[in-house]
Image: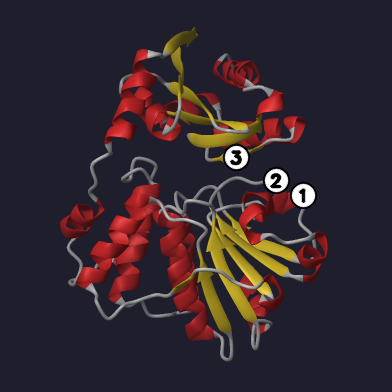
Amino acid sequence: MFRSKIQSYLNSLKGKTILITTHELADLDGVSSSIALNFFLKKLVNDIKTIIYFSGISKRTELFLERLKQKFPEFNPIFAESFENNSIDVFFILDTNKLSNVDEFLKLNQIQREQRHFFFIDHHFSDEMTINSKENIQGICLDEYSSTCEIIFDLFEEFKVSFIDPIRFLLIAGIITDSGYLKFANNHTIQALAKLLNDNIEYQELRLMLKTEPDISEKIAQIKGTQRAEMIKVKKWLIGVSQVSSFEASAANILIKIGFDVAMVISERKDEYRISVRAKKRVCRKTGLHLGKLLEEISRDYNANGGGHDGAASINIAKEEGTLKDVILDKIKENLSK
């Protein structure tokens, strides 16, 4: 599926210095897909230098990497603490679909943006990759996939690159967590997992490696998000709207678990608001609601930064624009009223 699109690009990488990165506070899908892509490129392209760089890694991801290291002490991917922009020829940006999502920590000026090549690999909806792409920006963005790790899995399959067990663990972990423990999985997700699992990998062992307890701050955010929830009814659908100081995504997930069909949770940061929105898959299928497309459309109108999947999306909005709560709610109500 990807061979024709990426083969010529791979051929052009020989002798280049490549930076592989993902979004800020990288989750397991972003980190796992980055490590696996580095392994993939090293297998297929001679005479390249690769650098894996993360501006930050989530606590849950760090914990899984520690457990993976205990299981495979010989497997030790190196993460750079910093890099020189002028030394990078190509940026591979995973699990994010916009340069603006990584612009702050890449610190590229306009000339550097125009002179460097960027290749995005992501599973979130993005108009940027279809209507605003430039000659030096290419990518694979497939919002029908539940994780970026699934796309990386397909690359290994297309080019017949053999998996080693630590890479299998990473890809399975990224797929499981980003699909909401298979809640958002589709047939491709299950097929990929079936091929990645082998006699050396016990699925339940891997689930235990992923198991974490939310810290007290997250628990408080979940409880407060529930206590403060405002209920809005649109036809037979229930929307829950709430506000917390942090962990807005976690609070939105809890609202869905307790019975809301759509949840929107707002958190206030120093210079911006961040809104996480969730919807049950059944709602998206029956109404055509796609939260990622909805928030990306609003982003263009209000100079914000948003996007995601049909059932899970987020948006960051500068404080001078306000929370855009009513704007987002009106769009959601419009979809649910159809």
Q: Quadrant of residue 73?
A: bottom left
The correct choice, above or below, for 28 with respect to 298 in the image is: below
Helix, strand or loop at label 1? It is helix
- Report the quarter where the N terminus lies: bottom right
> Residue 310: x percent and y percent?
52, 36
> Residue 11: x percent and y percent?
65, 84
Q: Kindly indicate whether the residue at mark 2 contacts the one at mark 3 (C-beta within 8 angstroms).
A: no
Q: Which label lies toward us, 3 or 2?
A: 3
**Amino acid type, label 3:** Gly
The tag earlier along the polypeptide, 1 or 3, is 1
Tell me if I can see residue 1 in this picture. Answer: no
Q: Kindly indicate whether the residue at mark 2 contacts the one at mark 1 (C-beta within 8 angstroms).
A: yes
Q: Cα distance, mark 3 to mark 2?
A: 10 Å
**Amino acid type, label 2:** Asp
User: Mark 2 sits on what residue?
Assistant: 127
Helix, strand or loop at label 3? It is strand
User: Mark 3 sits on what residue?
Assistant: 307
Q: Cα distance, mark 1 to mark 2?
A: 6 Å
**Amino acid type, label 1:** Ile
Q: Residue at left 45%, top 18%?
A: 242
Q: Cα distance, mark 1 to mark 3?
A: 15 Å
User: Mark 1 sits on what residue?
Assistant: 131
The correct choice, above or below, for 167 with respect to 232 in the image is: below
Helix, strand or loop at label 2? It is loop
